[in-house]
């Protein structure tokens, strides 16, 4: 793709913020920097979408802005360095569930109504079944709680509607949204199985998570556009 100066600068700055977030998570000495960098990723994407929102439908603007806002709030509540309320983790999960629900609605609105997508249901159901099987096998004492189950359903539904957008939006929009949905699921897998894994999973959570939302923003911007330099 051809990079124009503005988009190249935005992309470079986003990668810089993500790099700072990843590095600052490695040491207690950078805990305050990490507290800022984590939610700053979503705030940055919010600003980027605001500046490039022209040509995007009103409903898409409302849903994506709301999803970014909910995810941003969730990141703040889930920050390990930040303790505001005793129930900050529950509030963080609720905010992220709301963000995912809004994205489901957003992708549903962009679906191709002629494509029922029944061929995608069985693979997604198999994935859900395998996920719950391994969750039960390796995390027997930490069963799939309500929040985790809701997240699983929402993200797989997100992937399903991402498939259904084919031939109703530009090819680039379809690709970015689908890739973003898959990346979000990868991030969620590491979040869910973190207690059972024998290695540090932060990078495997944050890099796909942040990249997924970047893909969502670009995908919605490109939804009705025939060209978009990024």
Image (cartoon, rainbow, N blue to C red):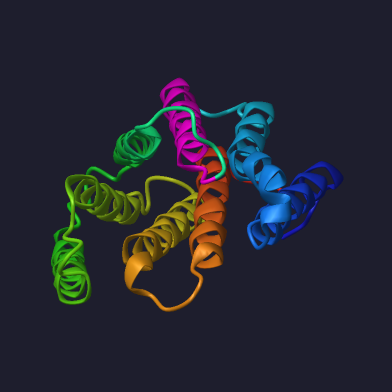
In x, y percent, where is residue 102? 35, 33
Residue lying farthest right?
5
> Quick check: 9 above or below 48?
below
Residue placed most toward the observer, 206 or 66 = 206
Residue 141 location, quadrant? bottom left
Residue 160 location, quadrant? bottom left
Which residue range is magenta in the image? 57-80
In x, y percent, where is residue 206? 54, 57
Identify the residue at image location x=14%, y=59%.
118
In x, y percent, where is residue 67? 43, 33
Query: Left of 74 or right of it: where is 81?
Result: right
Magenta stretch: helix, strand or loop mostly = helix
Residue 91 location, quadrant? top left
Query: Left of 38 or right of it: where is 133?
Result: left
Residue 228 in sight: no
Query: Left of 62 or right of it: where is 43?
Result: right
Identify the residue at image location x=29%, y=45%.
112
Identify the residue at image location x=20%, y=57%.
117
Q: Is residue 77 within the magenta segment?
A: yes
Residue 201 in sight: yes
Residue placed most toward the observer, 214 or 118 = 214
> Quick check: 133 above or below 116?
below
How many badges with numbers are in the image?
Answer: 0
In x, y percent, where is residue 45? 62, 38
Residue placed most toward the observer, 157 or 2 = 157
Q: Is residue 190 within the magenta segment?
A: no
> Quick check: 152 above or below 67?
below
Query: Left of 69 or right of it: where is 24?
Result: right
Q: Quadrant of the N terminus?
A: bottom right
């Amino acid at each position: 793709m051809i990079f124009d100066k503005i988009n190249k600068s935005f992309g470079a700055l986003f990668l810089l913020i993500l790099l700072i977030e990843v590095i600052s998570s490695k040491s207690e000495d950078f805990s305050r920097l990490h507290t800022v960098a984590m939610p700053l990723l979503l705030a940055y994407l919010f600003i980027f979408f605001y500046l490039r929102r022209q040509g995007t439908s009103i409903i898409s603007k409302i849903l994506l802005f709301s999803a970014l806002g909910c995810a941003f709030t969730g990141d703040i509540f889930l920050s390990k360095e930040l303790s505001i309320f005793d129930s900050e983790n529950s509030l963080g999960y609720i905010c992220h569930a709301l963000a995912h629900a809004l994205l489901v609605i957003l992708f549903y609105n962009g679906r191709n109504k002629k494509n029922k997508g029944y061929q995608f249901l069985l693979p997604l159901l198999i994935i859900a079944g395998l996920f719950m099987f391994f969750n039960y096998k390796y995390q027997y004492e930490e069963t799939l709680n309500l929040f985790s189950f809701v997240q699983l359903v929402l993200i797989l539904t997100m992937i399903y509607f991402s498939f259904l957008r084919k031939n109703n939006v530009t090819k680039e929009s379809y690709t970015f949204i689908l890739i973003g949905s898959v990346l979000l699921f990868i991030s969620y897998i590491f979040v869910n199985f973190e207690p059972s894994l024998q290695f540090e999973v932060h990078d495997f959570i944050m890099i796909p998570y942040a990249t997924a939302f970047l893909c969502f923003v670009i995908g919605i911007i490109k939804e009705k556009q025939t060209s978009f330099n990024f």
